[in-house]
């Protein structure tokens, strides 16, 4: 009978414990703007950073020599430039910039940054600058880059954040305590990353919350003020019904596609690839399960890009035509294909939709959902028939060379489909982008899907924030 | 003597763990150099870095270097963050221990009394209700129970934070998510174990001697029924210390389980290796502690 008395005691004690620990009320009274993000930055040293979160934070922390305009043309940022010769570029700092530790940014810092990058043997960006023969400082405002070989796209690559020379010499840990000259400075990073705007001291915290449902619950409860991207559409729609939350959407430029293995005996047949393209109802997927402002894609770079091609005809959803194409190719139906994807819920959902859409065309899609590491390794190794991925933050048409050039097969590039086409190689060499995109669209080494719409959701405590087309967080520098 | 033998037996186990972890990491598809340098790196750069890191040496030599570094307390550094792994472990492991201990306490505090209550009312409606609840709880996965608790206690009632580690109350929901599942197991185990003991002769004798029901249950029956419960608690504690990946992920709890999964996803091999080692050592340690507690609880074990 003792237990009869014990159990209620423990239950009441437990309840008291819970009630006694009630946290602060729903609305935050702090001036800090709190943003929940799906993935925390891994490394805030711009020489090492490659993940999207680090790149986005580094855009706020550091200034770069050049930037891109709305049509993705390279424009001066910290410096104007002049091509003295195809192997000599001279940069002149436009205005005085100050590092967050109070030092003035000079041409010596530019030289030190790029030289230190070249000296790092384990830096992923080093290969892009391997052809820098030497860097010379003319004066505090002017620096010259001398190349060992001609590179038409050299200026576009100079988007590494500039670091202070003196700190580089001291071996400062920029990965965890960055010092830049951007609009936002580093404050601390125990678990949440805290930044402060230089102009008004406004603090911003970035907290990693992996689970999308939990990010939404935190926004609804008022534990965070702002979310951007990385939510399934149904959660975005749920937030749109909440009167306390504002949801803004914008056209995106991140390109989703279906990769095909061109070395596969079945997929090397153009009719089969066309059949797959005609077996996907992309418009229906966009309307039913995508965020607003998602649009059909024809090529990696969007139509508004200077190397974009708005004239590429879409492959319409025509399952009967797809079936005919397969029969013309001598394929015995149903055609069994393996589609590899990650374990991300949204990706798996797309896979099941594709599976249902392709069935009437006589394609039996076998879905393999793998953990990200294994999936990506399989893609790089060419162990796939079909896979789904997204290109994020692509700015320059050089991507066509690295993704479709026959000499850029992994591990030396991004030609994961092992596409070999002499015509494309010749067009790439001439940088004839309309013809390149046209030829790729005809040959279908991949099936273009869509540019996913961008969105941001925020509470009333936040004003003047709008999502950017590539999903960057530049708006944090200006929001109120 | 037994304890000394038991301690000694830990050494080959730990060595086996080290060897197995090392081999498994090297068998996983992928290349640390490619992870570091990305897909644009030239072959010569990759080879140079591979040589610098000693990755082109025979596995036996690499394992020797690994053991040597380990003996000096050097677990290496993360490929991505460049943080010394020992710092990552120091930052993450206490959080896991904290969550595990609170979850275990909740599990024991809820599960054992419920099990006793059910045993004392075996065959009655109270027993049926408790069994039903415990079956339900053990069938609820953390990825479902966690958000449900968040919705109830954080969003609707507003009593607790949704997730994170900022507030002292932040631990309650993740601990409850883990503790409720554990309590279900303990309820059933306590009930079964106690029912077996309650029918023994010595309990009947104790009652016949006129001892109070409280004394009979707590001092005689429960003590004898404790051994299987200790086993379950030990095993569960081992699992909890290994990191409860889903719960830590859902509640943004910066523990070792989350670190392990993140490192696997990002192919951060040295971190994965270190995490597996820590997890394995935790299991070994908990098993050792369970053995010792066994001997305290049951003197017969000392001579077994």
Image: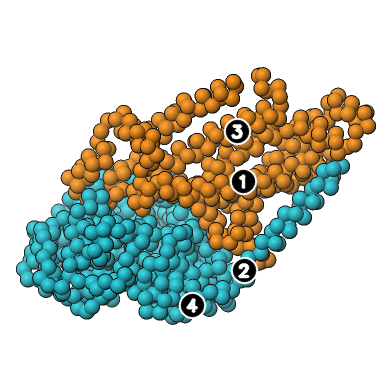
Same chain check for tags 2 and 4: yes
- Which quarter shows the C terminus of chain A? bottom left
Same chain check for tags 2 and 1: no
Pointer 3 or 1: first along the chain: 1
Residue at numbered disc 1: B101
Residue at figure coordinates x 17%, y 45% from the top left:
B44
Q: Give the left or right position of residue B190, taking residue A147 as reference.
A: right
* Chain under numbered label 2: A
Which quadrant of the structure image shows residue A98? bottom left
Tell me the shade of chain A: cyan
Q: Depth-wise, is mark 3 or mark 2 nearer the camera?
A: 3
Kindly report the distance in space between the C-alpha atoms of the residues bearing marks 3 and 1.
14 Å
Out of B34 and A45, give the one closest to the viewer. A45
Mark 4 in CB contact with mark 3 (< 8 angstroms): no
- B34 is higher (above) or lower (below) than A177: above
Question: What chain is colored orange?
Answer: B
Q: Kindly identify which numbered label has been placed on residue B289.
A: 3
Q: Depth-wise, is mark 2 or mark 4 nearer the camera?
A: 2
- Mark 4: secondary structure: loop
Kindly report the distance in space between the C-alpha atoms of the residues bearing marks 2 and 1.
25 Å
Out of A56 and A435, give the one closest to the viewer. A56
Residue at numbered disc 2: A24
Same chain check for tags 3 and 2: no
The percent coordinates of residue A352 (x first, y second) are 47, 53
Q: Give the left or right position of residue A385, taking residue A249 as reference.
A: left
- Mark 3: secondary structure: helix
- Mark 1: secondary structure: helix
Pointer 2 or 4: first along the chain: 2
The percent coordinates of residue A31 (x first, y second) are 50, 76
């Amino acid at each position: 009978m003792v237990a009869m008395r014990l159990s209620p005691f423990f239950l009441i004690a437990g309840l008291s414990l819970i009630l006694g620990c009630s946290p602060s009320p729903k609305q935050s009274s702090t001036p800090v703007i709190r943003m929940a993000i799906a993935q925390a930055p891994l490394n805030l040293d711009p020489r090492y950073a490659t993940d999207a979160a680090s790149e986005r934070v580094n855009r706020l922390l550091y200034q770069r020599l050049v930037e891109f305009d709305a049509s993705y043309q390279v424009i001066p940022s910290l410096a104007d430039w002049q091509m003295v010769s195809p192997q000599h570029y001279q940069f002149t700092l436009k205005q005085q910039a100050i590092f967050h530790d109070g030092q003035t940014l000079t041409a010596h810092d530019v030289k030190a940054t790029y030289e230190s990058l070249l000296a790092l043997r384990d830096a992923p960006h080093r290969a892009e600058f391997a052809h820098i023969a030497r860097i010379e400082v003319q004066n505090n405002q002017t620096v010259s880059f001398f190349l060992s070989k001609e590179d038409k796209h050299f200026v576009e690559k100079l988007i590494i954040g500039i670091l202070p020379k003196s700190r580089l010499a001291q071996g400062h840990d920029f990965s965890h305590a960055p010092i830049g000259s951007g609009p936002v400075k580093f404050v601390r990073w125990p678990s949440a990353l805290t930044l402060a705007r230089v102009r008004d001291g406004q603090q911003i915290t970035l907290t990693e919350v992996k689970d999308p449902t939990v990010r939404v619950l935190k926004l609804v409860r008022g534990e965070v003020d702002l979310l951007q991207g990385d939510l399934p559409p149904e959660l975005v729609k749920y937030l749109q019904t909440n009167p306390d939350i504002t949801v803004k959407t914008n056209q995106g430029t991140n390109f989703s596609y279906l990769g095909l293995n061109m070395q596969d005996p079945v997929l090397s047949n153009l009719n089969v690839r066309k059949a797959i393209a005609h077996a996907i109802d992309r418009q229906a997927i966009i309307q039913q399960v995508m965020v607003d402002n998602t649009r059909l894609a024809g090529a990696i770079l969007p139509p508004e890009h200077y190397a974009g091609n708005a004239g590429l005809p879409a492959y319409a959803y025509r399952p009967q035509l797809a079936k005919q194409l397969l029969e013309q190719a001598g394929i015995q139906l149903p055609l069994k294909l393996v589609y590899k994807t990650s374990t991300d819920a949204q990706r798996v959902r797309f896979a099941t939709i594709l599976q249902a859409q392709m069935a009437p065309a006589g394609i039996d899609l076998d879905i393999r959902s793998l953990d990200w590491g294994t999936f990506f390794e399989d893609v790089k190794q060419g162990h796939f028939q079909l896979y789904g991925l997204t290109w994020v933050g692509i700015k320059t048409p050089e991507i066509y060379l690295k993704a479709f050039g026959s000499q850029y097969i992994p591990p030396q590039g991004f030609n994961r489909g092992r596409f070999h086409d002499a015509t494309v190689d010749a067009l790439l060499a001439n940088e004839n982008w309309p013809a390149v995109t046209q030829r790729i669209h005809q040959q279908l080494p991949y099936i273009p899907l869509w540019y996913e719409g961008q969105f941001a959701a925020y509470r009333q405590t936040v004003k003047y924030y709008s999502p950017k087309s590539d999903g960057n967080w530049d708006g944090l520098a200006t929001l109120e | 003597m037994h304890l000394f033998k038991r301690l000694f037996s830990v050494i080959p186990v730990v060595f086996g763990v080290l060897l197995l972890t090392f081999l498994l990491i090297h068998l996983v598809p992928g290349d640390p150099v490619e992870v570091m340098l990305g897909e644009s790196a030239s072959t010569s750069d990759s080879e140079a870095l591979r040589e610098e890191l000693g990755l082109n040496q025979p596995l036996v030599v690499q394992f020797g270097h690994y053991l040597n570094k380990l003996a000096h307390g050097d677990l290496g550094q993360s490929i991505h963050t460049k943080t010394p792994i020992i710092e990552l472990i120091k930052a993450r492991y206490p959080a896991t221990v904290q969550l595990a201990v609170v979850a275990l306490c909740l599990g024991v505090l809820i599960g054992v009394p419920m099990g006793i209550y059910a045993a004392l009312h075996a065959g009655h409606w109270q027993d049926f209700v408790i069994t039903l609840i415990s079956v339900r709880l053990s069938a609820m996965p953390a990825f479902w129970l966690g958000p449900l608790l968040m919705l109830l206690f954080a969003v609707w009632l507003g009593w607790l934070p949704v997730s994170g580690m900022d507030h002292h109350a932040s631990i309650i929901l993740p601990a409850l998510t883990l503790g409720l599942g554990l309590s279900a197991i303990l309820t059933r185990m306590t009930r079964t174990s106690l029912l077996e003991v309650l029918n023994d002769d010595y309990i009947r004798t104790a009652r016949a001697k006129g001892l109070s029901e409280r004394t009979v249950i707590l001092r005689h029956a429960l003590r004898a029924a404790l051994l299987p419960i200790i086993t379950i608690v030990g095993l569960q504690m081992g699992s909890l210390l290994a990191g409860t990946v889903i719960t830590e992920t859902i509640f943004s709890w910066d523990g070792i389980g989350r670190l392990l999964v993140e490192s696997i996803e990002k192919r951060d091999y040295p971190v994965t290796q270190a995490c597996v080692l820590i997890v394995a050592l935790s299991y070994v340690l908990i098993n050792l502690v369970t053995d010792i507690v066994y001997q305290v609880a049951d003197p017969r074990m000392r001579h077994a």
